[in-house]
Image: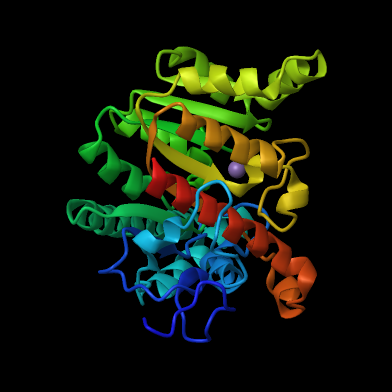
Amino acid sequence: MTAFNPNDAAAKDSGIFGLPYSAEEAKVVLLSVPWEATTSYGGGTAQGPRAILEASKQVDLFDLELGNFYESGIALLDELPDLNEWNRIAKAAAQKIILAENLSEKELTQALTLVNSTSQKINEYVYQTTQKQLSEGKCVGLIGGDHSSPFGAIKAFLERYPNMSILHFDAHADLREAYEGFEDSHASIMHNVISKTSLKKLVQVGIRDFCEDELNFIKENKSRIVTFFDVSMIDEKMSGKSFSVICDEIISHLSDEVYISFDIDGLDPRFCPHTGTPVPGGLDYNEALYLLKKVARSGRKIIGFDLCEVSLGDEAEQESLDTAAQWDANVGARLLYKLCGYALTT
Ligand SMILES: [Mn+2]
């Protein structure tokens, strides 16, 4: 502790953001969930937490707007050792299904059961861990993994904060009722939240990729889901409405306690070129931060968050671990630091 100087470069053995805090000392604990079994397109998001940890050491600690919030302590929890193996086995089974290899009915059922039961194990682990940390007075942030990773965390947060709402940044609505047979698919996370929890309000921004069923689901659940489609936001911006006013409208739907679920692909893909399912359009990095700032300034409390789908791309891209692949982790680490900052200062 005594050797720590916030103005110096991060020490080799330091924790996330180069900080010296243990999980016991830290107010914000980060839970890494390198899980991407149901990823349907580009892989690599299971490497997200490791890449973000690496990149986090380049982030300057002092924040012009939020000050030295890190002094409350931010620490990464030890990763569950079994998780990489669970991911590897379930991913292999899921790939067989996705690629529609010549499987018999029995093999298909077996593979599907394996994926779905491993997803349940992940959900249970994330739920138990989050619940324990919240009961110790910690603020919890989850680093995915694909976007199915935080379901257990959201469940635990809802038990503690029954009136909380979710502000969901994403290119995708994530409202599919299962996807490719996977009950806990990354594309189903918010469908599962709406159908399996008592969440009162889900507010979505950046949404520009969804199927008709998902649009119908939004309409059927309009008292609980408010979606700010990318195309509508662009319409308003193009015709001169200020982004600040649009933010106020988004925020007006949120309750006093806000959980942020941030899929990095909600941003313009130039900020996350290696994410699994990039879609053109989306929020600028500064727009996302501005919306978060306005949530904080509205007097609402940011109680917790997840950051998912940050990826360095497939193995070949990771091999050439140069600046191109590290860019995604650089953006992810900076966004993660801001999320920690808002959680600590609201
Ligand atoms: Mn997405």
Residue 339, image x, y percentages: 49, 49
111 left or right of 237?
left
What residue is rendered at 50% in x and 23% in y? 251
34 left or right of 274?
left
Q: Is residue 116 visible?
A: no
Q: Quadrant of ligand 1?
A: top right
User: In which quarter of the view is residue 98 placed?
Assistant: bottom right
Residue 307, image x, y percentages: 51, 51
What residue is rendered at 29% in x and 60% in y? 125
Q: Is residue 281 above or below residue 213?
A: below
What residue is rendered at 53% in x and 67% in y? 92
Counting the numbered discs, the total is 0
Task: Say which quadrant the C terminus sits in.
Answer: top left
Residue 102, image x, y percentages: 61, 60
149 left or right of 176?
left
Observer-nearest of 5 and 175? 5
Observer-nearest of 1 and 151? 1
Q: How is the image coloured?
A: rainbow
Residue at the left extreme, as displayed = 135
User: In which quarter of the view is residue 245 placed?
Assistant: top right
Observer-nearest of 5 and 210? 5
Task: Say which quadrant the N terminus sits in.
Answer: bottom left
Q: Is residue 159 visible?
A: yes
What residue is rendered at 45% in x and 72% in y? 19
55 left or right of 224?
right
Q: Is residue 189 above or below residue 131?
A: above
